Image (cartoon, rainbow, N blue to C red):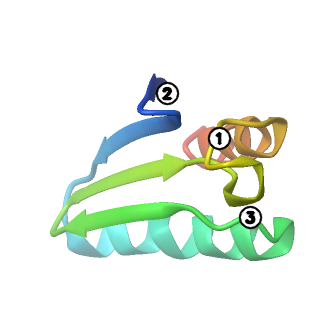
Amino acid sequence: MWHEQDQKLVREFKFADFMEAFTFMTRVALIAEKMNHHPTWYNVYNYVRIELSTHDADDSITERDRRLAKAIDDILQ
């Protein structure tokens, strides 16, 4: 689940392996590009951490972040 931390929406994901994590990141990248709203993320092998905030709104959480978080959640369903 997403949680708020340091004015960001944050969620961590673990996958079976690197290819599964990278496939997920690729799917997120395509959605983020379409929404013109790009996450801050970290990846090590099967671990992905995503942080969402809106830079134009003083790096706070906005509706754009919530929409992207929902779209990311939808990938996993």
Q: Position of residue 24 (x, y in %)?
A: 47, 64
Q: Please, what is the three-letter code of the amino acid marked with disc 1?
A: Ala
Q: Say what secondary structure mark 1 lies in.
A: helix
Spatial distance from mark 2 to mark 1, Cα to Cα? 8 Å
The image quarter containing residue 61 is top right
Query: Residue 26 or 33: which is nearer the viewer?
Result: 33
Residue at image mark 1: 69
Q: Say what secondary structure mark 2 lies in.
A: loop
Residue at image mark 3: 37
The label shown at residue 21 is none
Q: Position of residue 3 (x, y in %)?
A: 46, 23
Spatial distance from mark 1 to mark 3, Cα to Cα? 11 Å
| Residue drawn at x 19%, y 64% as measured from the top left | 17
Q: In this figure, what is the number of numbered marks?
A: 3
Report the side of 16 relative to 51 (left or right).
Answer: left
The label shown at residue 2 is 2
Q: Please, what is the three-letter code of the amino acid marked with disc 3?
A: His
Cβ–Cβ below 8 Å for labels 2 and 1? yes
Give the mark nearest the N terminus, 3 or 2: 2
Spatial distance from mark 3 to mark 2, Cα to Cα? 17 Å
Position of 8 relative to 33 (above/below):
above
| Residue drawn at x 52%, y 33% as measured from the top left | 7
Q: Please, what is the three-letter code of the amino acid marked with disc 2?
A: Trp
Position of 72 relative to 43 (above/below):
above
| Residue drawn at x 33%, y 41% as measured from the top left | 12
Q: Residues within 10 Å of mark 1 (few under 14, many from 20)?
A: many
